[in-house]
Image: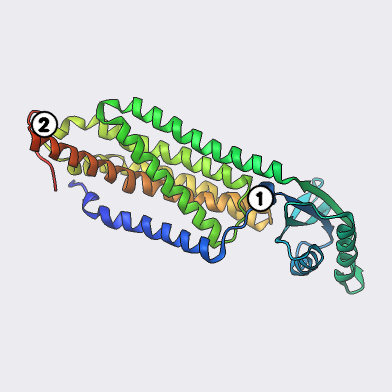
């Protein structure tokens, strides 16, 4: 079976990735990102309500007015307090950003208005007053710093590992192009969070690190096959070797990715049905990230390395250094 010409369509694949990055940038400048108070600092009010379908827009209006126009986001979720689903507890979470927490007077006023505005058919839908949690800005900044540090450390360890593992076939270049592919995956996830207004919080960091681990694992499998086929470079161009190697791993890559995507999609569907927002905010971007990781491993990292290797061989042939190492290079 003749290998598919992935390298011949490499600029199309690069264009798709570039388009997604542009969409992410446009989304950022047009509407920005919702950053959770766990990173920025603020106040969280947690109300127990009698229905899982309460109108949260009323809460947003109340809190925005009382807090003086601060950024407000809401979440509704249902927890089970026992084995019987009739013991479910419905919660309305209200997150208010700000460098200073709400004052006791503001919280009292919000409690009063919540009880006044959430009366349906003569029944107050709000049970008691809010449970208040405060996140100091310094704590939020520390969490954000630690999240960025975790990603950077993972990149550094990946570069070191790949440079050593693939040292016989230009390991440093493979490491660099792998990180480029990972940056594409992270950008795709930022795009998803921006377009769907998903708050950037601890779940985002967990999803990013998960996608980084999956994507680099997939990339290593593809690059392993390059290493095994390195002897072909004496007879074939890097483009032909890469096409051949991708075809050898393509079935395994697709089957593994579909299995992972199916599993995470099931988590998302169940979380969506049961209104578990923490899981939906994690699983949906994760599905997109896994798809992106599969795409970037095969169609971004591999073609970039092949282009670099092709140019290196062509340069060596031109200077006479590669006459005994390679026979041909593709322009």
Q: Which residue: 53% across, 52% down? A: 285
In this view of the protein, which residue sits in the foreground, 273 or 108? 108
Nearer the camera: disc 1 or disc 2: 2
Marks 2 and 1: in contact by CB < 8 Å? Answer: no
Residue 204 in picture, x, y percent from top left: 58, 47
Residue 12 in picture, x, y percent from top left: 28, 58
In this view of the protein, which residue sits in the foreground, 192 or 99? 99
Query: Can residue 112 be seen in this snapshot?
Result: yes
Instruction: Classify mark 2: residues with Cα within 10 Å, few (<14), some (14-19) or many (20+).
Output: some
Q: Which residue: 28% across, 34% down? A: 225
Q: Is residue 217 left or right of residue 247?
A: right
Q: Which residue is mark 1?
A: 278
Q: Earlier in the sequence, mark 1 or mark 2?
A: 1
Q: Is residue 269 left or right of residue 229?
A: right
Q: Is residue 29 left or right of residue 48?
A: left
Q: Does 318 appear above or below 167?
A: below
Q: CA distance from mark 1 to mark 2?
A: 56 Å
Q: Which residue: 58% across, 42% down? A: 206
Residue 295 in picture, x, y percent from top left: 37, 49
Residue 112 in picture, x, y percent from top left: 91, 64
Instruction: Classify mark 1: residues with Cα within 10 Å, few (<14), some (14-19) or many (20+).
Output: some
Q: Does 327 appear above or below 137?
A: above
Query: Image quarter for residue 78?
Result: bottom right
Q: Does 237 appear above or below 295?
A: above
Could you say whether the residue bearing mark 1 is in a helix, strand or loop?
helix
Q: How is the image coloured?
A: rainbow
Q: Which residue is mark 2?
A: 322
Q: Which residue: 55% across, 41% down? A: 148
Query: Can residue 327 be seen in this snapshot?
Result: no
């Amino acid at each position: 079976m003749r290998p598919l010409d992935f390298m011949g369509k490499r600029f199309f694949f690069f264009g798709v990735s570039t388009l997604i990055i542009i969409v992410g940038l446009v989304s950022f400048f047009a509407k920005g990102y919702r950053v959770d108070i766990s990173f920025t600092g603020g106040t969280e009010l947690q109300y127990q309500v009698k229905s899982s379908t309460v109108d949260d827009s009323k809460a947003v209006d109340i809190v925005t007015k009382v807090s003086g126009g601060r950024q407000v986001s809401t979440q509704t979720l249902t927890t089970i307090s026992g084995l019987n689903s009739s013991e479910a507890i419905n919660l309305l979470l209200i997150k208010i950003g700000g460098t200073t927490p709400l004052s006791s007077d503001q919280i009292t006023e919000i409690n009063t208005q919540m009880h006044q505005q959430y009366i349906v058919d003569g029944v107050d839908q709000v049970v008691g007053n809010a449970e208040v949690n405060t996140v100091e800005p310094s704590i939020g900044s520390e969490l954000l710093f630690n999240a960025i540090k975790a990603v950077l450390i993972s990149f550094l360890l990946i570069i070191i590992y790949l440079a050593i593992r693939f040292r016989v076939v230009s390991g440093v270049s493979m490491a660099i192009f792998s990180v480029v592919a990972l940056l594409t995956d992270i950008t795709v996830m930022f795009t998803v969070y921006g377009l769907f207004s998903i708050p950037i919080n601890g779940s985002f960091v967990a999803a990013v690190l998960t996608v980084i681990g999956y994507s680099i694992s997939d990339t290593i499998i593809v690059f392993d096959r390059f290493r095994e086929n390195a002897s072909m470079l004496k007879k074939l161009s890097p483009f032909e070797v890469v096409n051949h190697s991708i075809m050898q791993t393509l079935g395994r890559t697709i089957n593994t990715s579909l299995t992972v995507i199916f599993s995470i999609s099931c988590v998302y569907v169940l979380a969506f049905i049961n209104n578990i927002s923490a899981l939906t905010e994690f699983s949906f971007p994760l599905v997109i990230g896994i798809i992106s990781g599969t795409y970037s491993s095969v169609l971004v990292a591999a073609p970039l390395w092949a282009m670099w290797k092709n140019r290196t061989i062509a340069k060596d042939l031109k200077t006479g250094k590669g006459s005994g190492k390679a026979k041909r290079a593709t322009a």
